[in-house]
Image (cartoon, helix red, strand yellow):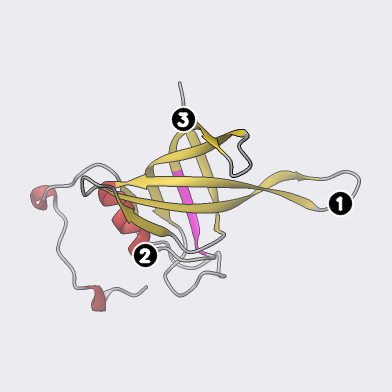
Amino acid sequence: MNKVYLIGNLTRDPELRTTGSGISVCNFSIAVNRRFKNQQTGQTETDFFNIVAWRQLADLCSRYLAKGRKVAVFGSLQSRTYEAQDGSKRTAIDIVADEVEFLSAKGNADQGNAPAAPAASSSYESPSSGFTQVDDEELPF
């Protein structure tokens, strides 16, 4: 089983690209604090993770996320190998997002206790699923 659940803050604004076949892909990274402090320094240590979202989820992340926003990411690990500029082979681990839940309101990136925005999921919801179309100007975030 390959499942990852992370809660952290965006370290930079998301980058949205489109593949040659027109599929949206959004890349961003999050900082996640560890549960325990370093015994020598007393400092909380932080890990940084690269996140990749595809299709509709990529569009939503690009539109509503920004540096500093708190998010929960549900997905899976994926490793890839690439050649660096110096010619050496490197391996990178990415989290491919299945769902991203926006935990801080837009414009309140530094406030962890702000009202949460709805979750964004990669699964498609049909208009008959009970959702009402809302103009972006009416949203509180």
Disc 1 is placed on an element classified as loop
**Above or below 1: residue 129:** below
Looking at the picture, how far across and down is residue 124, in whole percent? 19, 44
The residue wearing badge 3 is 3
**Quarter assignment of residue 65:** bottom left
Looking at the picture, how far across and down is residue 106, in whole percent? 42, 70
Disc 3 to disc 2, C-alpha distance: 24 Å
Q: Residues within 10 Å of mark 1 (few under 14, many from 20)?
A: few
Looking at the picture, how far across and down is residue 130, in whole percent? 14, 53
The reply, left or right, for residue 116 in relation to residue 135 is: right
**Above or below 107: residue 3:** above
Label pair 1/2, CB-CB below 8 angstroms: no
For the C terminus, give its image quadrant.
Answer: bottom left
Instruction: Give the magenta range.
Output: 69-73
Residue at 63% across, 34% down? 88
The residue wearing badge 2 is 64
Looking at the picture, how far across and down is residue 123, in whole percent? 24, 41
Q: Amino acid at mark 3?
A: Lys
**Residue most extreme to the top:** 1
Label pair 3/2, CB-CB below 8 angstroms: no
94 vs 81, nearest the viewer:
81
Residue at 44% across, 66% down? 115
Q: Residues within 10 Å of mark 3 (few under 14, many from 20)?
A: few
